[in-house]
Image (cartoon, grey):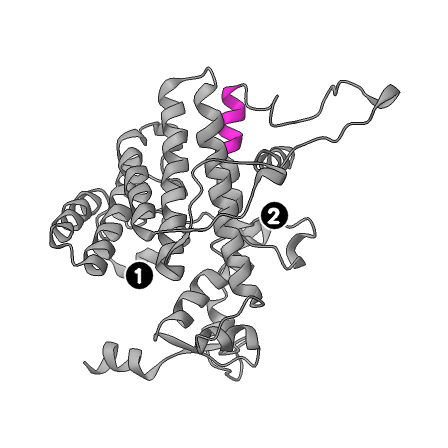
């Protein structure tokens, strides 16, 4: 619990207000952004904070806090399906039907919270990238931690531009009143950062003790880079990027071969099997999985004898025809 609290602190604004006179006192136990990033342990804790924001986010109220849940909670996949022609909402909530109808306004809370989660995670990545280079520590581990931060920063920005187009680009961390609102940056500029970050991750994700089990491999960066190249090629009609995508995909395929038995893919004993290129590592013991994978309540129609099947979304006829008819 102490390490998790520290993880959240390192990504927040840790400014302390001061008073005059006898109230002025040198802090003797406070964690601030000035005294925290000094040791290898601090560097690891700062990097681990990225995973907190991917999974649970920051919610002081606990499990039932509306803010509970990081990037990869329900609305990450729900909103993407509703943005496309893959799914449609059966809920009466205007929050989701407006996404389904592409009539999103500034009051849409699910979209707002997902946007916030993306940028909170980017902020954590930028903290690592700004603070860790100055720490005296194992150089291989340092490069690896910086590569992890770049891997996830690239992932967040790639999702942002796929969903929203031009978005604000922040490459460094700022605190408090200095954290001003930025204008949107052209997608081309963000693609440059994404590609650069992932190329670094391919090279520097080499510290064996931090590979797998919910953390990326070098080939995980290759796989994501293949997706980036493929998307870029289709969007800008850049034919040479198709070959780049193929080359990166081949690197990932060699590292992550398919299992011989499809059913083995879903066994608990095979949680980190050879097909997992990268996966968010939720903890069922902490009820993280409860909010992270409501496929039953959202996708399964209401059925007698089945608890909590609500059918909140369903596949569109267009998707059905493309998958099963054609």
Residue 58's label in the rendered image is: 2
Q: Which residue is mark 1?
A: 263
Q: Which of these two is toward me, 262 or 8?
A: 8
Mark 1, Cα crowd under 10 Å, few <14 / some 14-19 / many 20+, is few
Residue 127's label in the rendered image is: none
160 up-or-down from 121: above or below: below
Q: Say left or right for 9 vs 54.
A: right
Q: Position of residue 185 (x, y in %)?
A: 39, 50
Magenta region, main secondary structure = helix
Q: Which of these two is toward me, 129 or 90?
A: 129
The residue stretch that appears in magenta: 39-46
Single out the residue that lies furthest toward the top.
136
262 up-or-down from 209: above or below: below
Q: Image point 55% across, 58% down: which residue?
A: 113
| Image quarter of residue 35 | top right
Q: Position of residue 76 (x, y in %)?
A: 45, 60
């Amino acid at each position: 619990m102490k390490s998790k609290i520290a993880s959240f602190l390192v990504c927040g604004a840790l400014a302390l207000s001061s008073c005059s006179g006898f109230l002025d006192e040198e802090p003797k136990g406070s964690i601030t952004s000035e005294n925290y990033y000094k040791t290898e342990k601090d560097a690891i804790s700062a990097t681990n904070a990225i995973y907190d924001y991917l999974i649970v986010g920051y919610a002081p109220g606990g499990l039932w806090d509306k803010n509970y849940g990081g990037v990869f909670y329900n609305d990450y996949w729900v909103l993407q399906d509703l943005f496309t022609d893959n799914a449609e909402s059966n809920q009466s909530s205007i929050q989701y039907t407006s996404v389904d109808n592409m009539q999103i306004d500034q009051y849409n809370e699910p979209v707002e919270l997902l946007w916030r989660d993306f940028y909170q995670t980017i902020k954590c990545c930028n903290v690592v990238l700004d603070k860790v280079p100055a720490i005296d520590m194992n150089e291989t581990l340092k490069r690896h931690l910086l590569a992890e931060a770049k891997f996830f920063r690239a992932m967040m920005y790639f999702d942002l531009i796929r969903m929203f187009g031009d978005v604000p680009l922040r490459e460094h961390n700022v605190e408090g009143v200095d954290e001003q609102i930025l204008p949107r940056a052209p997608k081309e500029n963000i693609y440059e950062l994404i590609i650069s970050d992932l190329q670094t991750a391919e090279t520097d994700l080499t510290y064996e003790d931090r590979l797998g089990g919910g953390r990326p491999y070098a080939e995980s960066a290759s796989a994501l880079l293949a997706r980036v190249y493929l998307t870029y090629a289709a969007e800008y009609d850049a034919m040479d990027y198709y070959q780049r995508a193929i080359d990166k995909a081949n690197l990932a395929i060699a590292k992550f071969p398919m299992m011989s038995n499809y059913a083995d893919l879903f066994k608990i004993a095979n949680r980190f099997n050879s097909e997992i290129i990268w996966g968010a590592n939720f903890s069922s013991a902490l009820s993280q999985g409860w909010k992270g994978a409501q496929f039953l309540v959202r996708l399964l129609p209401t059925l007698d004898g089945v608890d909590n099947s609500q059918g909140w979304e369903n596949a569109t006829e267009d998707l059905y025809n493309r998958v099963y008819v054609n």
